Image: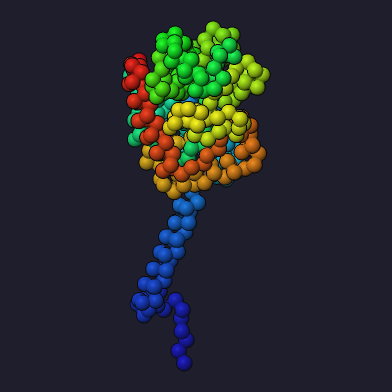
Amino acid sequence: MRAVVCGQIPVRGPRVLNPVIDRLARNAFGVLLMAAAAAAMGQAYPTKPVRLVVPAAPGGGTDITARLIAPKLSEHLGQQVVVENVGGGGGIIGMERVARAVPDGYTLVMGISSLAINPHIVAKISFDVLKDFAPVSQVAMVPNILVAHPSVPARTLRELIEHIRARPGQINFASSGIGSTPHLGMELFVSITGLKMVHVAYKGVGPAMVDVMAGHVPVMMANVLSVLPHINAGKLRAYGVTSLKRATVAPDVPTIAEAGVPGYEVVPWYGILAPANTPRDIIAKLRAGTVYALQDPATKERFISDGAEPVGGTPEEFAAVIRDDFKKWGKVIKDAGISPQ
C-alpha cells in the first residue's frame, strides 16, 4: 500500500471538483455581508450628538421650547441633543446656518413663525424659506390675546370694534415690533374688520405692555403667557385669543373668531426643521422623537402651563402650515403697505 502524502494533494482540488458548492458559498457570504451592511446603515443614525440651533438669544420662548423638548428627544434618539443659541437678524442668521448645513440630521433648527414672515419684510435673505428646509414637526403653537387698558369702555370684542370704528384713525395699537406676529395679527384684524388704527411699534413686548398698562396706548396683541398675569390682576382686559380654539390656560377668554370676527386665526408656532434633502428615514426618526417628547406628561404639562399648545404633527402638516403662513403674511404685509427693509 502506498502512503498518501498530504502535501502532494493539490490545494485547488476541491474548488475544481465542487465549483457549484464554491459559488454558492461565495454568494452566501456576499448576502451575509450585504445584510450586515444594511443593518449597520439602519442603525447608523445618530452616532453622535445632534445640534439643535435656536435662532435667538437664551431665555426667550424659542430657547425655552428647545430646552424643554431636548431631554426627551435625546432619550428617544440615544444621543444627546445639544441646544445652541445663534441669535441675530431677527432669527435669520441661525436659520441661514442650518439651511447651509450638511443634510445628515445632525444640524436642526427650532423654527418660529417669523420664518414665513421675514422674506416679505427683509430685502435680502440668502435662503429660500420654502425650498431650503425639510420640516420635521410642528412642536407647539402659542396664541396671542387681544387686550386693552381697562379705561377703554368696551366690554366685549363687538363693543371694542364699534368703539374703534366710531373714532377712525384716533385709536393706537402697540406691538413688539414691525413684522412681529402681534403686529401682523393686529393688521389682519384691522383689515378684516375695516377699521382704521395707528400702529405704534416698540422694541419688544415688555416696553409695549408697560405703555398699554399705563394707558398711553390703549390696545395691543401679545403672547398669552405675557399678558395672562396682567389680565388676572385686572390691569388689562381680554377680548379674544387669536387661535380657533380657546387657550387651555385661559378657557374663559373667547376666540376672536367666535367673539365677532369669523374666520380670524393667527397662531404663532415653534417647529423643528432640518436642511433640505435630509433623508426621509432620518426625518421620520426625528419626528417620532418629537412626538415622544411631547407625549411625556411632565413636558406636556410644562408647555401647557407656559401657555403653549403641544402639536407634534407630521412633516407634511408642518410644511402646509409654513406655506399657508407664507401666503397669508405676504398678503397682509402688502395690504398694510409695509416695505421690505
- Residue nearest the observer in this picture, 106 or 306: 306
Q: In this view, does 253 lie to the left or right of 36?
A: right
Which residue is at a point 41% across and 10% down the rendered structure image?
A: 169
Where in the figure is residue 293, as x and y percent of width and height?
58, 41
- Residue nearest the observer in this picture, 246 or 225: 246
Quarter location, residue 9: bottom left
Say how the picture is coloured. Answer: rainbow
Which residue is at a point 39% across and 76% down the rendered structure image?
A: 21
In this rendering, the answer to whether 41 lies above or below 161 is below
Q: In this view, does 152 lie to the left or right of 16?
A: right
- Residue nearest the observer in this picture, 31 or 228: 228
How many labels were placed on the picture?
A: 0
Quarter location, residue 94: top left
Where in the figure is residue 42, as x and y percent of width and height?
47, 53
Q: In this view, does 210 lie to the left or right of 269?
A: right
In this rendering, the answer to whether 92 lies above or below 31 is above
Q: Is residue 184 visible?
A: no
Which residue is at a point 58% across and 41% down the rendered structure image?
A: 294
In this rendering, the answer to whether 283 lies above or below 167 is below
Q: Is residue 198 left or right of residue 229?
A: left
| Quadrant where the C terminus is found in the figure | top left
Q: Is residue 314 visible?
A: yes
Where in the figure is residue 33, as x and y percent of width and height?
44, 61
Which residue is at a point 47% across and 86% down the rendered structure image?
A: 3
Where in the figure is residue 335, as x and y percent of width and height?
33, 20
